[in-house]
Image (cartoon, grey):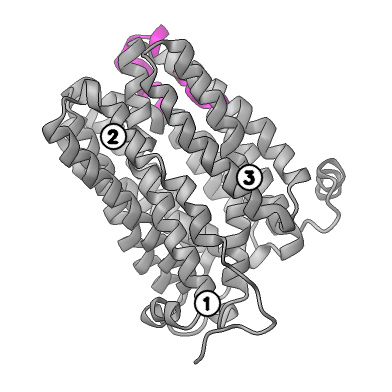
Amino acid sequence: MLKMLKVWLNQENVSKDLIFLLLIGGLYSLGIFLSSTFVNVYLWKQSNSYTDIALYNLSIYVMQPLTFIVAGKCAKKIDRVIVLRSGVIVLSAFFLAVLIIGEKAAQFNILLGSLLGIGYGFYWLAYNVLTFEITEPDTRDFFNGFLGVLQSFGGMTGPLFAGYVISTLDQLTGYTVIFAISFSFFILAVFISFGLSRRKAKGNFSFRRIVLERKYNANWNKILQAHVSQGFREGTFLFAVTIWVYLLTRDEFTLGIYNLVYSGFSLLFFFLVTRFVKPSRRKQAIFYAGLVLYVSVLLLLMGDSLLLLLFYGAVTGVFFPLLYVPYQSLTFDVIGKSWNAGEMRIEYIVVREIFLNAGRVLSIAVFLVAIAFIPPETGIPYILLIIGGGYFIIYFSIKGIQFKTKPSGQN
């Protein structure tokens, strides 16, 4: 089976663990994309409040980095695979909670967001650390690109299927069915995780030391600044565009079509970027992709037609992979060449996540302040125009990154 996958993927140096990690990432993507888009809509239909939706997402981004610190400490004491498994179980518990609470979910928006943030924290800490340990520089672009293909496939099929089910069945029944399917995907991911090789923990958790590493390592400081910029865009965009599309169409199936367009183009271009963007062209790809992604926000200001929104989805689907794959690979290369990376890789992942979520929290704070003074129905596109520059700013943080033969940090 493994040999067949290697031939199909045109990669001879792909390990068993890398394949299993991709399978877990694919199931995670299916489960999340099937339901997460519609959790925001589900809460919106109950409360009709942008503030409630923003607070739900804010609680995710507050709890996620805090959980990263706890998960990082755990990963230094117990098997990383167990930490990954714990994250998937908590994510399963989130969807189970939504199913149980049902039509009163909006009243527990902060609690539900916190539970989801905890699940994300455990899952992504372990997944990122395992990615760092399992991939090598010569397989890193392949892994990030193929994972992007799986994520795009999940984003393409999940929301469309969910939108069809929700719009066909009684809506409460439809949401129940979709959340239950997501729950089953996470349980399957738990079982697949037993195929991963054990990753024994060792060493002390030196979180503060890696925060201070910014003083000694210019590359590390620059990549952290870039992650704040990344988070500044994502914090609001990850929910506001979804709500905007739903308000325009008032139809979950059309929202699924929007995600189909976005993810369909992403699926193709994640594959192409993996094949054709070489390490020497990473910064150039990040610059042009970031610029186009920022300019594309203007499409949201040009009108409220569904055609424009679908065109916006297509543009972002084309250029997000061009930014994401080289940017993620560059990030792991910076960590890999930093001081004591072998022993401190968990701390590097934790600190990176804290800066990323700091940008997301700042983004939602700006959104909440803005809608207090501007009617959301007219102000959201302009708010997105301000926040949307985050991806473009990434380039100006990473353009000065240069690798030396020795790490620049000092013990």
Residue 274 falls in which quadrant of the image? top right
Left or right of residue 204: residue 336: right
Q: Residue 174: within the magenta?
A: yes
Find residue 201 and name its label: 1
Q: Residue 160: within the magenta?
A: yes
Q: Where is residue 41 drawn, in percent x and y?
A: 31, 24
Where disc 3 sits, the SS reads helix
Q: From the viewer's side, name the closer residue of 329 and 16.
A: 329
**Disc 2 marks which amino acid?**
Ile
Residue 50 falls in which quadrant of the image? top left
Q: In the current view of this chain or complex, which residue is farthest to the bottom?
A: 411
- From the image, tell me which residue sits under label 2: 383
Mark 2 or 3 closer to N-term? 3
Residue 333 appears in the picture as rendered: yes
Where disc 2 sits, the SS reads helix
Mark 1 or 2 closer to N-term? 1
Q: CA distance from mark 2 to mark 3?
A: 31 Å
Disc 1 crowd, CA 10 A, few/some/many (<14, 14-19, 20+): some
Residue shown at the point (33%, 39%) measured from the top left: 386
**Disc 3 marks which amino acid?**
Leu
Disc 3 crowd, CA 10 A, few/some/many (<14, 14-19, 20+): many
Disc 2 crowd, CA 10 A, few/some/many (<14, 14-19, 20+): many
Q: From the viewer's side, name the closer residue of 56 and 90.
A: 56
Q: Where is residue 184 drawn, in percent x and y?
A: 48, 35
**Disc 1 marks which amino acid?**
Ala
Q: CA distance from mark 3 to mark 1?
A: 25 Å
Q: Is label 3 in contact with label 1 (beta carbons under 8 Å)?
A: no
